[in-house]
Image (spheres, rainbow, N blue to C red):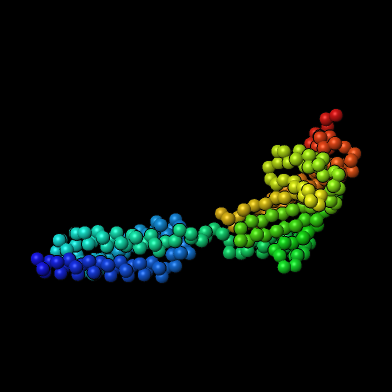
Amino acid sequence: MTQKTSSGRESGKQITDAIAHLVQELTSTGLATMPQELASTQLTNELIANLFQEIANSGLSGLPEEATNNTQVNAAIGHFFDELANVIPSTITNPSISKQSIFQTIINFFKSDEWEFQQLDGIPVIQLAFQGKNGRWDCYAKAIDEQAKFLFYSVFPNNTPEDKRSIMAEFLTRANLGTIIGNFELNFANGEIRYKTSIDTADEPLALSLIKGLVYTNVFMMDKYLPGICAVMEGNISPEEAIRSIEQPNIN
């Protein structure tokens, strides 16, 4: 009886040593930088296979059945899975995020698309100008890398006079109805009007094609509604009439 107990203890120690070795190997593989799906499937399966190979290599297959088919073995394997769960972090870096900063990607786009621009001092924002069919205005491209966001603004050249801000708000609200990408904004504090398009890139890299779609949709919308903005600001037309002249130009 004493001999069996000693043998069982030895088997438990060897299993624990084998598992400890595997957990150490797991840590050294750099698992924390791997995709969650890979870490929890392919690599885990390989480690489980290695676990039993390690047990076999330890000479435990030659031990009496009582020494290996017991609660020590079950406890050791259970401990292995507990250690595995601890090694795989719950917040693994998403490998789909591009290592290149959003701001650098924005710069690369405007260079490749041959825009003239300048970076504002000390902040990840670039200023550009766009000439549309109905006017010229400034644009701003902004990167928020820590939130994985890209924003693009078209800013109307003149601020809305204070006494016109309520009717301008009505015009812009009517213009926003039905828009799919982006929206008009009015700053009631200073009368600034702008059109904003934006995207969250947390789940995938910011592709140049996405930037192009957001930028050109933005400037098209500002150019389309710019005559109505001017008409409402000058007081020549009601917001409803201004929208109708833009969206239903052939209806009297």
Q: Quadrant of the C terminus?
A: top right
Q: Quadrant of the N terminus?
A: bottom left
Q: Which residue is depicted at the point 61% across and 58% down?
A: 147
Residue 132 appearing in the image: no
Q: Which residue is depicted at the point 72% across and 52% down?
A: 215
Residue farthest toward the top in the current orientation of the protein: 252
| Observer-nearest of 13 and 132 | 13
**Total of numbered circles in the picture?**
0
| Observer-nearest of 177 and 219 | 177
Query: Quick check: 51 left or right of 60?
Result: right
Whether 4 is drawn above or below 140: the answer is below
Residue 78 appearing in the image: yes
Q: Position of residue 43 (x, y in %)?
A: 39, 61
Q: Which residue is depicted at the point 27% across and 67% down?
A: 16
Q: Position of residue 128 (x, y in %)?
A: 78, 59
Q: Which residue is depicted at the point 21% across and 59% down?
A: 71
Residue farthest toward the left in the current orientation of the protein: 1
Query: Quick check: 65 left or right of 50?
Result: left
Give residue 129's quadrant in the image.
bottom right
Q: Position of residue 247 (x, y in %)?
A: 79, 36
Query: Quick check: 58 left or right of 165?
Result: left
Q: Position of residue 192 (x, y in %)?
A: 80, 51
